């Protein structure tokens, strides 16, 4: 979460001399010209050493958490622990036509991961350091309510009971027990299982049971944005928490004008993903100004926010 920071003011101490009255006359003295002038007195030496002063206290800065409920948005130095499983020059951007927890306008089952559209044989890389805990097809072991849903897949265990899952592979290049480093090639893009064409299905799962279908997290909160880009998290706060697939329009504007540059049409999570604190995440957004627009029973809501490079912008809306 972003933090507001308050800086204490320094104290200024001003020294001054007492003023001399403007009408004060210089003192006069009577002098006897027959008396020799007095001898010049001997003055004691005056030390020029300044007294040693204690060091000035260092101002303390107390971070105050930024609260996205009471502000338009918060920008946080979010930790993105994983790199992208597809690396340039191949397509390393998430396919926005079938985002996490979306249904393509109720045409498909809610999506528990994200897609990277690439050709057969494209190298698939480990998103982080870890140990391979599964490397086979899912014909015998279920990772979804159905067998042979993911086809050939690899699962890597990372720290803190976090797992990354790589599905629909045409070939598996690791085996259970292998220690892998971030960036290692672990397989190749394919179309096994329930895939309708070649792509990588990528998931992030949390908890002790990596086969649990509803242990998924939105990968776009975990993958580091590409250079020059950031991420945007949107949360809807409502009494009944029923914000299923709320349509939104997210528009990019020029930083110094109202010139519209491009627009995304997205929706909030589908039913079944209420366990997430957020309702939508977009990664790989160019840094700059965005307008979020949606409607509820109270009418049209619009808000400008800023996306910063390598950061997470958090936005919360109170809705009816």
Image (spheres, grey):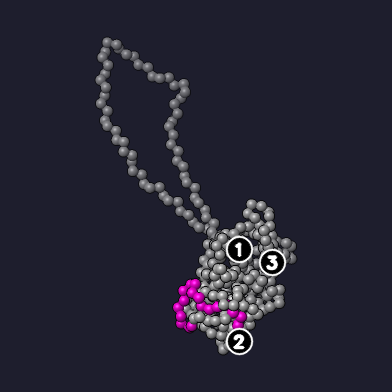
145 in relation to 204, above or below: below
Q: In the rendering, which numbered label is found on residue 285? A: 1
Q: In the rendering, which numbered label is found on residue 265? A: 3
Q: Position of residue 132 (x, y in %)?
A: 49, 80
Q: CA distance from mark 1 to mark 3?
A: 13 Å
45, 121: nearer the viewer: 121
Q: Residue furthest top?
A: 34
Q: Which residue is mark 2?
A: 147
How many numbered marks are there? 3
Q: Position of residue 222 (x, y in %)?
A: 55, 70
Q: Secondary structure at mark 1?
A: strand
26 in relation to 219, above or below: above
Q: Secondary structure at mark 2?
A: loop
Q: CA distance from mark 2 to mark 1?
A: 35 Å
Q: Is residue 58 in view from this perspective? A: yes
Residue at image coords 30%, 12%: 32
- The crowd level at tag 2 (other Cα within 10 Å; few <14, some 14-19, many 20+) is some
Quarter in which the C terminus is drawn:
bottom right
Residue range in magenta is 175-192
Q: In the rendering, which numbered label is found on residue 13? A: none
Residue at image coords 66%, 57%: 253
Q: Is residue 304 in view from this perspective? A: no
Identify the mark nearer the N-term, 3 or 2. Answer: 2
**Magenta stretch holds residue 191:** yes
Q: Position of residue 141 (x, y in %)?
A: 56, 87
49 in relation to 148, above or below: above
Identify the mark nearer the N-term, 2 or 1. Answer: 2
């Amino acid at each position: 979460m972003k933090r507001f920071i308050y800086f204490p003011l320094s104290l200024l101490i001003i020294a001054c001399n007492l003023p001399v009255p403007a009408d004060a006359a210089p003192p006069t003295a009577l002098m006897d010209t027959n008396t020799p002038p007095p001898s010049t007195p001997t003055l004691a030496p005056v030390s020029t050493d300044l007294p040693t002063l204690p060091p000035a206290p260092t101002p303390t800065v107390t971070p105050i958490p930024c609260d996205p409920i009471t502000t338009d948005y918060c920008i946080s130095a979010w930790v993105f622990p994983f790199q992208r499983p597809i690396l340039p020059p191949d397509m390393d951007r998430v396919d926005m036509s079938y985002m996490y927890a979306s249904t393509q306008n109720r045409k498909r089952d809610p999506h528990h991961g994200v897609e990277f559209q690439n050709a057969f044989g494209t190298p698939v890389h480990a998103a982080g350091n870890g140990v391979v805990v599964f490397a086979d097809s899912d014909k015998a072991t279920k990772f979804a309510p159905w067998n042979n849903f993911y086809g050939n897949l690899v699962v890597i265990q990372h720290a803190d009971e976090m797992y990354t899952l790589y599905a629909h592979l045409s070939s598996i290049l690791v085996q259970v027990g292998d220690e892998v480093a971030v960036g290692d090639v672990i397989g190749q893009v394919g179309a096994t299982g329930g895939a309708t064409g070649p792509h990588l299905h990528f998931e992030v799962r949390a908890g002790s049971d990596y086969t649990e279908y509803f242990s998924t997290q939105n990968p776009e909160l975990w993958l580091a944005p590409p250079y020059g880009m950031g991420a945007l998290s949107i949360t809807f706060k409502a009494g009944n928490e029923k914000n299923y697939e709320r349509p939104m329009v997210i528009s990019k504007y020029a930083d110094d004008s109202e010139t519209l540059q491009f627009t995304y049409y997205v929706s909030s999570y589908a039913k079944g993903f209420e366990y997430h604190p957020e309702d939508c995440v977009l990664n790989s957004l160019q840094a700059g100004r965005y307008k979020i627009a949606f409607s509820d029973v109270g009418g049209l809501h619009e808000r400008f926010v800023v996306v910063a490079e390598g950061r997470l912008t958090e936005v919360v809306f109170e809705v009816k």
